[in-house]
Image (cartoon, rainbow, N blue to C red):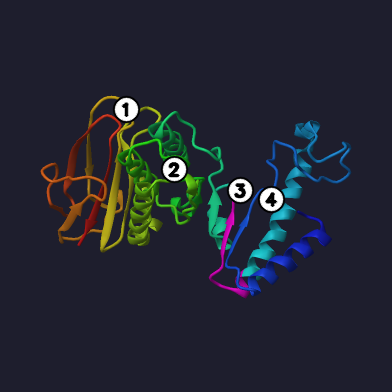
Amino acid sequence: MTGKTYMQKLENRVLELARMGISYFKFDGLFGHLNLRDFDITNNPFPSSNDERLNDSSYDEQKGYYLSAGTERLMQIFNKLGAVNPDIFIAITNGAYLSPWWLQYIDIVWLINAGDAAKGNDRNGELVYRDQIYHQIWKEENTKFPISAIFNHEPKKISSDETPETFRNYLYMNLSRGTGFIELYIKTDNLSSSDWDILADGLKWSRKMFSTFHNVHIHGGSPQQNEVYGYTAWTDKQGYISFHNPSDMPQSYRITLNRTVGMPESKTYLKVNSPTTNIQGRLATKYRYGDTISITLAPKEILILDFTR
Protein backbone atom coordinates (compact mmCIF):
# COMPACT_ATOMS: atom_id res chain seq x y z
CA MET A 1 0.00 0.00 0.00
CA THR A 2 3.03 2.30 -0.17
CA GLY A 3 4.64 1.08 -3.39
CA LYS A 4 4.64 3.87 -5.98
CA THR A 5 4.04 1.62 -8.97
CA TYR A 6 1.25 -0.41 -7.38
CA MET A 7 -0.58 2.57 -5.87
CA GLN A 8 -0.44 4.50 -9.15
CA LYS A 9 -1.99 1.53 -10.96
CA LEU A 10 -4.67 1.30 -8.24
CA GLU A 11 -5.41 5.01 -8.56
CA ASN A 12 -5.63 4.82 -12.35
CA ARG A 13 -8.05 1.92 -12.21
CA VAL A 14 -10.47 3.27 -9.59
CA LEU A 15 -10.57 6.67 -11.30
CA GLU A 16 -11.29 4.91 -14.59
CA LEU A 17 -14.18 3.05 -12.94
CA ALA A 18 -15.51 6.27 -11.42
CA ARG A 19 -15.51 7.95 -14.84
CA MET A 20 -17.44 4.95 -16.18
CA GLY A 21 -20.18 5.64 -13.63
CA ILE A 22 -19.27 3.45 -10.67
CA SER A 23 -20.47 5.43 -7.64
CA TYR A 24 -19.70 3.09 -4.72
CA PHE A 25 -16.27 1.84 -3.68
CA LYS A 26 -15.51 -0.48 -0.79
CA PHE A 27 -11.84 -0.55 0.21
CA ASP A 28 -11.43 -3.65 2.33
CA GLY A 29 -8.46 -5.17 4.14
CA LEU A 30 -6.14 -2.28 3.38
CA PHE A 31 -3.76 -2.52 6.31
CA GLY A 32 -2.72 -4.96 8.95
CA HIS A 33 -3.25 -4.12 12.61
CA LEU A 34 -0.37 -2.37 14.36
CA ASN A 35 0.15 -5.32 16.71
CA LEU A 36 -0.24 -8.02 14.06
CA ARG A 37 1.59 -8.99 10.89
CA ASP A 38 0.73 -8.34 7.21
CA PHE A 39 3.12 -5.42 6.87
CA ASP A 40 5.44 -4.75 3.97
CA ILE A 41 8.16 -3.15 6.06
CA THR A 42 11.54 -2.08 4.72
CA ASN A 43 14.22 -4.81 4.80
CA ASN A 44 11.85 -7.44 6.17
CA PRO A 45 14.17 -10.12 7.60
CA PHE A 46 11.53 -12.83 7.21
CA PRO A 47 10.21 -14.70 4.16
CA SER A 48 6.84 -12.94 4.03
CA SER A 49 4.77 -10.05 5.40
CA ASN A 50 2.65 -12.62 7.22
CA ASP A 51 5.40 -14.03 9.40
CA GLU A 52 4.44 -14.37 13.08
CA ARG A 53 7.76 -12.90 14.15
CA LEU A 54 6.59 -9.51 12.79
CA ASN A 55 4.24 -9.37 15.79
CA ASP A 56 7.23 -8.45 17.95
CA SER A 57 7.05 -4.91 19.34
CA SER A 58 10.47 -4.09 17.89
CA TYR A 59 8.75 -3.66 14.50
CA ASP A 60 6.00 -1.33 15.74
CA GLU A 61 7.81 1.86 14.72
CA GLN A 62 8.26 0.66 11.15
CA LYS A 63 4.62 -0.42 11.07
CA GLY A 64 3.60 3.06 12.17
CA TYR A 65 5.51 4.58 9.26
CA TYR A 66 3.82 2.13 6.90
CA LEU A 67 0.34 3.01 8.18
CA SER A 68 1.00 6.74 7.90
CA ALA A 69 2.45 6.57 4.41
CA GLY A 70 -0.31 4.29 3.17
CA THR A 71 -3.04 6.47 4.65
CA GLU A 72 -1.63 9.61 3.04
CA ARG A 73 -1.55 7.88 -0.36
CA LEU A 74 -5.16 6.75 0.04
CA MET A 75 -6.22 10.31 0.94
CA GLN A 76 -4.96 11.42 -2.47
CA ILE A 77 -7.02 8.70 -4.18
CA PHE A 78 -10.14 9.54 -2.16
CA ASN A 79 -9.84 13.23 -3.07
CA LYS A 80 -9.44 12.42 -6.75
CA LEU A 81 -12.50 10.14 -6.66
CA GLY A 82 -14.47 13.03 -5.16
CA ALA A 83 -13.29 15.30 -7.94
CA VAL A 84 -14.66 12.87 -10.53
CA ASN A 85 -18.00 12.56 -8.72
CA PRO A 86 -18.76 14.64 -5.59
CA ASP A 87 -21.57 12.21 -4.65
CA ILE A 88 -19.39 9.09 -4.80
CA PHE A 89 -19.78 6.80 -1.76
CA ILE A 90 -16.65 5.33 -0.17
CA ALA A 91 -16.50 2.69 2.55
CA ILE A 92 -13.30 1.66 4.32
CA THR A 93 -14.06 -1.68 5.94
CA ASN A 94 -10.64 -2.68 7.16
CA GLY A 95 -10.94 -1.67 10.80
CA ALA A 96 -9.72 1.92 10.65
CA TYR A 97 -9.70 3.70 13.99
CA LEU A 98 -12.91 5.63 14.71
CA SER A 99 -11.91 9.23 14.17
CA PRO A 100 -14.23 11.79 12.53
CA TRP A 101 -11.12 12.88 10.64
CA TRP A 102 -11.81 10.05 8.19
CA LEU A 103 -15.17 11.59 7.25
CA GLN A 104 -13.41 14.36 5.36
CA TYR A 105 -12.53 11.70 2.79
CA ILE A 106 -14.93 8.77 3.08
CA ASP A 107 -18.49 8.00 4.18
CA ILE A 108 -18.50 4.81 6.25
CA VAL A 109 -16.03 3.06 8.58
CA TRP A 110 -16.30 -0.56 9.68
CA LEU A 111 -17.02 -1.30 13.35
CA ILE A 112 -13.46 -1.99 14.43
CA ASN A 113 -13.79 -3.99 17.66
CA ALA A 114 -16.27 -6.67 16.60
CA GLY A 115 -16.29 -9.75 14.42
CA ASP A 116 -18.00 -9.90 11.07
CA ALA A 117 -20.80 -12.12 12.35
CA ALA A 118 -22.66 -11.25 15.53
CA LYS A 119 -22.08 -13.95 18.11
CA GLY A 120 -25.04 -15.46 19.93
CA ASN A 121 -27.24 -18.54 20.09
CA ASP A 122 -30.37 -16.68 18.99
CA ARG A 123 -31.49 -13.27 17.78
CA ASN A 124 -31.47 -11.89 21.32
CA GLY A 125 -27.86 -12.99 21.76
CA GLU A 126 -26.82 -11.56 18.39
CA LEU A 127 -28.33 -8.18 19.24
CA VAL A 128 -26.72 -8.13 22.68
CA TYR A 129 -23.32 -8.96 21.21
CA ARG A 130 -23.37 -6.15 18.67
CA ASP A 131 -25.17 -3.60 20.84
CA GLN A 132 -22.70 -4.14 23.68
CA ILE A 133 -19.96 -3.11 21.24
CA TYR A 134 -21.91 0.07 20.50
CA HIS A 135 -22.38 0.62 24.26
CA GLN A 136 -18.65 0.22 24.85
CA ILE A 137 -17.70 2.71 22.14
CA TRP A 138 -20.30 5.43 22.70
CA LYS A 139 -21.30 5.09 26.37
CA GLU A 140 -18.21 3.77 28.14
CA GLU A 141 -15.52 5.34 25.95
CA ASN A 142 -17.60 8.34 24.79
CA THR A 143 -16.04 8.15 21.34
CA LYS A 144 -16.71 11.24 19.25
CA PHE A 145 -17.77 9.52 16.05
CA PRO A 146 -21.26 9.47 14.52
CA ILE A 147 -23.04 6.14 14.82
CA SER A 148 -24.63 6.81 11.43
CA ALA A 149 -21.18 6.50 9.81
CA ILE A 150 -20.66 2.95 11.09
CA PHE A 151 -20.88 -0.21 9.00
CA ASN A 152 -21.33 -3.73 10.36
CA HIS A 153 -22.25 -7.07 8.78
CA GLU A 154 -25.97 -6.94 9.51
CA PRO A 155 -28.90 -7.41 9.17
CA LYS A 156 -28.40 -11.10 8.46
CA LYS A 157 -30.94 -13.65 7.28
CA ILE A 158 -29.76 -17.03 6.01
CA SER A 159 -32.75 -19.29 6.74
CA SER A 160 -36.48 -19.29 7.47
CA ASP A 161 -36.32 -21.28 10.70
CA GLU A 162 -37.68 -18.48 12.90
CA THR A 163 -41.09 -16.94 13.36
CA PRO A 164 -42.02 -13.82 11.40
CA GLU A 165 -42.33 -11.92 14.69
CA THR A 166 -38.79 -12.88 15.73
CA PHE A 167 -37.34 -11.76 12.42
CA ARG A 168 -39.36 -8.53 12.39
CA ASN A 169 -38.25 -7.54 15.90
CA TYR A 170 -34.61 -8.38 15.17
CA LEU A 171 -34.67 -6.47 11.89
CA TYR A 172 -36.19 -3.27 13.27
CA MET A 173 -33.96 -3.27 16.36
CA ASN A 174 -30.98 -3.73 14.06
CA LEU A 175 -32.07 -0.92 11.73
CA SER A 176 -32.76 1.39 14.67
CA ARG A 177 -29.00 1.67 15.22
CA GLY A 178 -29.22 4.27 12.49
CA THR A 179 -26.38 3.25 10.24
CA GLY A 180 -26.29 5.26 7.04
CA PHE A 181 -25.11 2.18 5.16
CA ILE A 182 -27.36 -0.87 5.22
CA GLU A 183 -25.76 -3.86 3.54
CA LEU A 184 -27.97 -6.95 3.59
CA TYR A 185 -26.43 -10.32 4.47
CA ILE A 186 -29.08 -12.67 3.15
CA LYS A 187 -29.28 -16.02 1.36
CA THR A 188 -31.98 -15.15 -1.13
CA ASP A 189 -32.88 -18.74 -1.98
CA ASN A 190 -33.63 -19.48 1.68
CA LEU A 191 -36.06 -16.62 2.34
CA SER A 192 -39.81 -17.20 2.51
CA SER A 193 -42.47 -14.86 1.15
CA SER A 194 -43.08 -13.44 4.62
CA ASP A 195 -39.34 -12.89 5.08
CA TRP A 196 -39.28 -10.76 1.93
CA ASP A 197 -42.33 -8.79 3.09
CA ILE A 198 -40.77 -8.08 6.48
CA LEU A 199 -37.47 -7.10 4.88
CA ALA A 200 -39.29 -4.70 2.56
CA ASP A 201 -41.19 -3.16 5.48
CA GLY A 202 -37.96 -2.64 7.40
CA LEU A 203 -36.17 -0.99 4.49
CA LYS A 204 -39.15 1.30 3.87
CA TRP A 205 -39.05 2.26 7.56
CA SER A 206 -35.31 3.04 7.25
CA ARG A 207 -35.97 5.21 4.22
CA LYS A 208 -38.71 7.09 6.10
CA MET A 209 -36.51 7.63 9.15
CA PHE A 210 -33.24 8.17 7.30
CA SER A 211 -33.23 11.93 7.87
CA THR A 212 -33.01 11.31 11.63
CA PHE A 213 -30.13 8.83 11.49
CA HIS A 214 -27.35 11.45 11.59
CA ASN A 215 -28.59 12.33 15.11
CA VAL A 216 -28.87 8.79 16.47
CA HIS A 217 -27.48 7.86 19.88
CA ILE A 218 -27.87 5.20 22.56
CA HIS A 219 -30.09 5.41 25.62
CA GLY A 220 -30.42 3.13 28.62
CA GLY A 221 -28.05 0.66 30.24
CA SER A 222 -25.65 -2.12 29.33
CA PRO A 223 -26.92 -4.87 27.00
CA GLN A 224 -24.38 -7.28 28.46
CA GLN A 225 -25.74 -6.65 31.95
CA ASN A 226 -29.28 -7.38 30.73
CA GLU A 227 -30.37 -3.78 31.23
CA VAL A 228 -32.97 -2.09 29.04
CA TYR A 229 -31.38 -0.06 26.26
CA GLY A 230 -32.10 1.20 22.78
CA TYR A 231 -31.52 3.89 20.18
CA THR A 232 -33.21 7.20 19.47
CA ALA A 233 -32.98 9.85 16.77
CA TRP A 234 -34.93 13.00 15.92
CA THR A 235 -35.48 15.86 13.52
CA ASP A 236 -37.94 18.73 13.89
CA LYS A 237 -40.63 16.68 12.15
CA GLN A 238 -40.19 13.13 13.38
CA GLY A 239 -38.27 10.74 15.59
CA TYR A 240 -38.16 7.22 16.96
CA ILE A 241 -37.14 5.30 20.05
CA SER A 242 -36.24 1.62 20.13
CA PHE A 243 -36.26 -0.46 23.32
CA HIS A 244 -34.79 -3.88 24.04
CA ASN A 245 -35.13 -5.82 27.25
CA PRO A 246 -32.48 -8.55 26.83
CA SER A 247 -33.18 -10.23 30.18
CA ASP A 248 -35.44 -13.17 31.10
CA MET A 249 -37.41 -10.98 33.48
CA PRO A 250 -39.89 -8.12 32.91
CA GLN A 251 -38.33 -4.69 33.41
CA SER A 252 -39.83 -1.24 33.86
CA TYR A 253 -38.18 1.68 32.10
CA ARG A 254 -38.62 5.45 31.94
CA ILE A 255 -37.38 7.89 29.33
CA THR A 256 -38.01 11.64 29.20
CA LEU A 257 -38.49 13.33 25.84
CA ASN A 258 -36.03 16.22 25.96
CA ARG A 259 -32.71 17.38 24.61
CA THR A 260 -30.92 14.58 26.44
CA VAL A 261 -32.46 12.09 24.01
CA GLY A 262 -32.04 14.51 21.11
CA MET A 263 -35.63 15.70 20.82
CA PRO A 264 -35.94 19.32 19.61
CA GLU A 265 -37.77 21.59 22.03
CA SER A 266 -41.34 22.35 20.94
CA LYS A 267 -44.85 22.77 22.37
CA THR A 268 -46.37 20.73 19.54
CA TYR A 269 -47.71 17.26 20.26
CA LEU A 270 -46.40 14.28 18.31
CA LYS A 271 -48.48 11.25 17.43
CA VAL A 272 -46.97 7.91 18.41
CA ASN A 273 -47.33 4.50 16.82
CA SER A 274 -45.27 1.37 16.30
CA PRO A 275 -44.27 -0.30 13.03
CA THR A 276 -43.92 -3.67 14.75
CA THR A 277 -46.72 -4.09 17.30
CA ASN A 278 -50.08 -2.80 18.51
CA ILE A 279 -49.52 -0.28 21.32
CA GLN A 280 -53.17 0.77 21.75
CA GLY A 281 -53.99 1.03 25.46
CA ARG A 282 -50.36 0.58 26.44
CA LEU A 283 -49.18 4.13 25.84
CA ALA A 284 -50.72 7.53 25.26
CA THR A 285 -51.63 8.43 21.68
CA LYS A 286 -49.48 11.58 21.66
CA TYR A 287 -46.56 13.12 23.52
CA ARG A 288 -44.67 16.39 23.53
CA TYR A 289 -41.35 17.77 24.71
CA GLY A 290 -40.81 17.20 28.45
CA ASP A 291 -43.17 14.22 28.77
CA THR A 292 -41.91 10.98 30.32
CA ILE A 293 -42.70 7.59 28.86
CA SER A 294 -43.02 4.81 31.43
CA ILE A 295 -43.26 1.30 30.12
CA THR A 296 -42.85 -2.29 31.29
CA LEU A 297 -41.12 -4.55 28.81
CA ALA A 298 -41.68 -8.29 28.77
CA PRO A 299 -38.68 -10.66 28.83
CA LYS A 300 -36.59 -10.16 25.66
CA GLU A 301 -39.17 -7.76 24.26
CA ILE A 302 -38.29 -5.33 21.48
CA LEU A 303 -40.40 -2.23 20.96
CA ILE A 304 -40.11 0.46 18.30
CA LEU A 305 -41.97 3.77 18.69
CA ASP A 306 -42.37 6.28 15.86
CA PHE A 307 -43.20 9.94 16.57
CA THR A 308 -44.60 12.30 13.91
CA ARG A 309 -45.93 15.83 14.04
Mark 1 lies on a secondary structure that is loop
Label 3 SS: loop
Cα gap from disc 1 to disc 4, whole angstroms:
39 Å
Q: Amino acid at mark 1?
A: Ser
Nearer-N-terminus badge (1/2)? 2
How far is disc 4 from disc 2 in space, using C-alphas? 25 Å
Q: Earlier in the sequence, mark 4 or mark 2?
A: 4
Of 248 and 136, the residue lying toward us: 248
Q: Answer left or right for 9 relative to 215.
A: right
Residue 289 seen in the figure: no
Q: Residues within 10 Å of mark 3 (few under 14, many from 20)?
A: some
Q: Residue 146: horizontal and vertical position, in percent?
A: 45, 53
Amino acid type of the residue tagged 2 in the rendering: Trp
Contact flag, marks 3 and 4 (Cβ < 8 Å): yes
Q: Which quadrant holds residue 222?
A: top left
Marks 1 and 2 sit apart, C-alpha to C-alpha, by 22 Å
Name the quadrant of the C terminus: bottom left
Looking at marks 3 and 4 on the same chain, the residue that comes earlier in the sequence is marked by 4
Query: Disc 3 designates what residue?
Result: 96
Quick one: quadrant of the N terminus?
bottom right
The residue labelled by disc 2 is 138
Say if residue 100 shows up in the picture.
Answer: yes
Q: Nearer the viewer, residue 108 or 20?
A: 20
User: Of marks 1 and 3, which one's residue comes earlier in the chain?
Assistant: 3
Please provide percent x and percent y for residue 53.
80, 31
